[in-house]
Each structure stands twice: as C-alpha cells, then as structure tokens.
Image: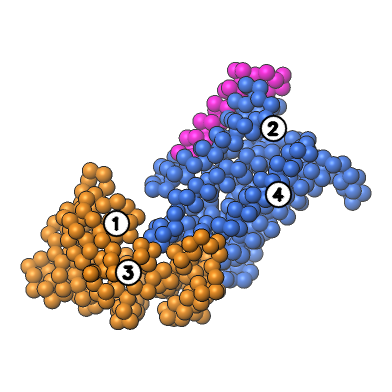
C-alpha cells in the first residue's frame, strides 16, 4: 500500500491535489467557529449554490475563466446575506434558504436549456459533489490557491481579536468603538473567497461540512476561542489529508471521502468530550 | 458640565416613537437607575445613549472629557453567548478593544488592565475557565470586568441581575455600589424598584408618565408612590 502511495506521489497532479486540499481545509476551518456561533452554519451552503449558479452562467456564455463571474457574484451574495442576518435572525435564515435553493434551481435550468456539453448530468454531478477536477489542477491554479489561502490566513490572524469581539458580542463591540459593520463585511468577503476555493475540492453540496465540522468537533473538546480555532484548523487539515489519501488509494470520490472522515472525527470528538468533560477545560 | 446631558430626546424605531421629549443629566459619581414598565423603552434608551441606534429626535451631549469609546456597557446576555467557547480571560481582554486603535493585537498594558479588573471582580481564579460553564452570577462578573476594561468612568448596565438567584443578586448590587463609591458613574436599567431605591442616587422613570430627579424626590412624588404600590402588589401575587 505504501508502495502504491509512493507511486502516486510521483505524479505532480497528486501532489498538487494534496497541497490544494490541505490549504482549502485550513482556510475553511478558520471561520467555521465564527459562522457556527453567529448561527450562519448554512451560509456555506447558500453561497456555494450561488457559486454553482455562477458556474452555470459562466459555462453557458463560454467564459474561459469562470472565476470572473463566480467570485464577484458570491462575494456580493455573502455581503447581502450577512447584512440581512444582523437584525432579525429568522429573516437571515430564510434569506439563505431562498438564495440557496433559487440559485441551485436556476443554475441547473440554465445549464439544461443552453447546454453545450454532451454529458450534462456528469457536469452537474461533478459541480455539486466535487469532481476529479482537483486531480486535474494546473500549475497556475495551484498558485492562485496558495496566494488566496495565504491572504485568508493572514487576514484572519491580523483581525483575530476583532473577529472574536464581533462574534462574541456585536453590541458591546460597537459601543466600544469597533466598526462592527466593517468586520462583518470582512467576514463575508473571506467566507465567499473560501467557498469559491473549496468548490474545487468537495463541490457545492458538501462545502458546509468542510466549514462547520472541524469547528463543531473542536468545540466539543476545548473551552477557549483560541484553542478551539487552532484545534479546528489542525483537525481539518488532518481530515482533509486522510480523506485525500484514502480516496486516491481506494478510488473513492474525493469530496465525499473527506466529508466522511470529518464526520468520523466529529463522532470521536463528541464521545471524547462526553467522557472526559472536555480534554482540558479552559 | 455634566458627564451626560439628554435634551428633548425622542426614542423609537422609524415612525413609531415610544418616548418623547426626555430631559435629564448625569453628573460624575451619580448612580442613576432607569425604571419603567416592560416595553416602556428602557433598553431603547440605553442603546440610544450608546449610539447603537439613532434617536428619533433631540440630542445627547457627552461632556467632561469622556470619549465615545470610554463607556463601559453590560448588555443583556444573548443566546449566542450561552454556549460560546471562550475563556474568561479572552472575554475580559476584549473589553480593551476600544483602545486598540490601529493596532492588531493587545499589548502588555491591555493584559495588565484585564488582570486587574478580573481581580477587582473576584474572578481571577476563573481566568482560564470556559465562560459557558460558569454560573449566572460568575458570567455577569466576567461581563462587568469586561465593561470596566473599556472604562473607568461611566458604566451602562442593562438588567445586571436578570436571571440571578436572590443571594447572588444582592452580591451583584453590592459590587456595583462599591464601584460607584470608587468613583465610577453608573446608569442602570432595573425593574427591581426596591433595589433601585436602596442603591441609586437618582431615578429616571419612563413610560406613560415621566420623572427625573433624586431618589428622595421620587419617593415623595405621586408617580413614585403609585409605581411602588403597584410593584408591591405584583410581588405579593
């Protein structure tokens, strides 16, 4: 088995997939804690469906680089969603559901009506569940991913204290003179970037898993924001790595394998948390 | 000049004005208690004082060398906070965010201030504990320590004893009075009128009838007497 793995690792596309997979897992786990706590667990779902709609439009108008459509559309949707969610939570929930299902339906409709491809259901399936596309990354795509990941991690570290304040108590943050709107906007833009990145890895149906599972797992174990954030980042990277290796060796679909590993990790963390009352409280 | 002066203030959302033409002022060292029936606009008033929402009319003047970000705020707890994975130290430290300015991280002074305020509130030994595992009284102490990190001058407290048991309630009130004696100006919302009368120096009553004055004036006024008997009846039921 080790030999088989070593053989696979000689191929650049396998190495690219591992690098990109790990980076995406790292980025998506960072904001997970914030989104779960702000009750925005489903924003990942909503936005990824918007991104799916964007991809559908891009492929219909035959754009060579679909990022040009997908990225701005997703960022705008993220900003709009987080804005409606601030005052009335139910409205935010409903807005996410609306945009999510609407974008999914329109995306599929557009792809169906204006289809240029001979294998439509294959196309749709790969966009929804992640595809082999992570194994067909070009050198340039890998670099784009690295640059964007570094940007996300740097922004998160620099604004860590503000993100914490705004997540824990938005009113207090505003009263203390922090520009909460600006940091909510930052969170929205970051999450949109992460989702567009992660579409390659797990596809638009499973993105929420990548965002929320590591955070939820880490929250079973630790009681401080910093430890939860670090733990969820590490957990996410390990799960993504394990998932990628398994899928390469066993020939299973990449996205669903990673998510399955994440679910298993959550189960382990949940039981550990229950048994020990938290590994280390504090 | 007073620390805080409110002139002809009207409160409300959009066209729905709840309170009209409110006038009062708070001097350094005062302990003002805001009382009134549920829905009379107490929390709206506090949010307006904090500039979290715009007044429907009138103005709020902040004076005496106090800056906008030098107001400590103790909000009512939100659902989100109930299962928030954060340590006591992280939360108290976040009270220093007003002084961050252009910096990204907290410095030694901020951390020292957080430690000092944790000791002041008697929660230094809980510093590494997780907030969601603390009792209601301990959680309020954490939030009070956080508010103190933001200010040494003016505290705005929104129902600080909501949901606490009687013994902890008394402790909380004593803690607040002690801060007031140390020179911190306190503005507190409460619907516990007896406690308000025991500790406060001034009373602001809002609702259908409005009143502002010292505690003694309130006790002598018609509105004060009416509200007191009404509350007493409510307690006895």
**Residue B209 visible:** yes
Determine the chain carrying the residue at label 1. B
Tell me whether marks 2 and 3 sit on the same chain. no
So how many labels did they put on this image?
4
Nearest to the eye among marks 4 and 1: give it: 1
Tell me whether marks 2 and 4 sit on the same chain. yes
Can you identify the residue that label 1 sits on?
A: B48
Kind of element beneath mark 3:
loop
Residue B188 located within the stretch drawn in magenta: no
Magenta region: A95-120
Q: Mark 4 or mark 2, which is nearer the start of the sequence? A: 4
- Badge 3 crowding class, 10 Å Cα cut-off, few under 14, some 14 to 19, many 20 or more, is few
Nearest to the eye among marks 3 and 1: give it: 3
Nearest to the eye among marks 1 and 2: give it: 1
Q: Mark 1 or mark 3, which is nearer the start of the sequence? A: 1
Q: CB under 8 Å between callouts 4 and 1? A: no
Determine which of the numbered discs, if any, sits on residue A126 in the image: 2
User: Which chain is in blue here?
Assistant: A
Kind of element beneath mark 4:
helix
**Residue B131 visible:** no
Q: CB under 8 Å between callouts 1 and 2? A: no
Q: Is residue A171 left or right of residue B33?
A: right
| Location of residue A85 by image quarter | top left
Can you identify the residue that label 3 sits on?
A: B65
């Amino acid at each position: 088995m080790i030999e088989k793995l070593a053989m696979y690792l000689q191929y650049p596309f396998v190495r690219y997939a591992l690098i990109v997979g790990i980076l995406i897992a790292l980025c998506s786990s960072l904001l997970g804690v914030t989104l779960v706590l702000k009750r925005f667990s489903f924003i990942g779902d909503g936005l990824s469906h918007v991104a799916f709609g964007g991809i559908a439009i891009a492929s219909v108008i035959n754009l060579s680089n679909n990022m040009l459509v997908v990225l701005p559309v997703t960022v705008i949707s993220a900003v709009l969603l987080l804005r409606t969610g601030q005052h009335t939570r139910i409205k935010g929930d409903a807005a996410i559901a609306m945009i999510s299902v609407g974008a999914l339906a329109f995306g599929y409709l557009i792809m169906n009506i204006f289809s240029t491809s001979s294998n439509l259901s294959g196309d749709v399936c790969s966009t929804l569940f992640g595809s082999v596309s992570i194994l067909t990354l070009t050198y340039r795509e890998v670099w784009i991913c690295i640059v964007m990941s570094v940007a996300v991690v740097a922004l998160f570290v620099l604004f860590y204290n503000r993100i914490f304040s705004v997540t824990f108590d938005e009113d207090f943050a505003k009263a203390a003179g922090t520009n909460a709107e600006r940091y909510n906007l930052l969170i929205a833009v970051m999450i949109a970037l992460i989702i567009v990145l992660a579409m390659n890895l797990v596809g638009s149906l499973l993105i929420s898993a990548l965002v929320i599972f590591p955070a939820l797992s880490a929250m079973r174990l630790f009681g401080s924001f910093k430890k939860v954030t670090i733990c969820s980042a590490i957990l996410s990277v390990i799960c993504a790595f394990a998932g990628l290796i398994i899928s390469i060796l066993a020939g299973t679909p990449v996205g669903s394998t990673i998510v399955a590993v994440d679910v298993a990790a959550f189960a382990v963390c949940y039981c550990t948390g229950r048994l020990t009352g938290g590994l280390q409280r504090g | 000049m007073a620390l805080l002066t409110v002139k002809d203030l009207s409160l409300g959302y959009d066209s729905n004005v709840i309170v009209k033409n409110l006038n009062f002022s708070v001097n350094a060292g005062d302990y003002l208690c805001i009382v009134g029936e549920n829905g009379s606009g107490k929390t709206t008033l506090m949010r307006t004082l904090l500039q979290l929402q715009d007044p429907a009319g009138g103005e709020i003047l902040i004076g005496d060398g106090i800056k906008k970000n030098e107001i400590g705020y103790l909000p009512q707890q939100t659902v989100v906070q109930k299962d928030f994975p954060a340590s006591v130290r992280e939360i108290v430290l976040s009270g220093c965010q007003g002084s961050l300015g252009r910096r990204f991280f907290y410095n030694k002074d901020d951390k020292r201030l957080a430690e000092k305020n944790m000791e002041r509130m008697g929660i230094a030994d809980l510093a590494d504990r997780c907030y969601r595992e603390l009792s209601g009284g301990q959680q309020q102490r954490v939030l009070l320590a956080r508010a103190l990190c933001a200010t040494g001058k003016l505290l705005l407290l929104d129902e600080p004893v909501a949901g606490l048991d009687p013994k902890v309630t008394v402790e909380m009130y004593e803690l607040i009075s002690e801060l007031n004696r140390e020179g911190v100006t306190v503005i507190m919302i409460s619907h516990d009128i007896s406690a308000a009368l025991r500790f406060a120096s001034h009373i602001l009553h809002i609702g259908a009838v409005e009143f502002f004055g010292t505690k003694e004036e309130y006790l002598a006024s018609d509105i004060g007497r009416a509200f007191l008997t009404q509350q007493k009846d409510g307690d006895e039921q």
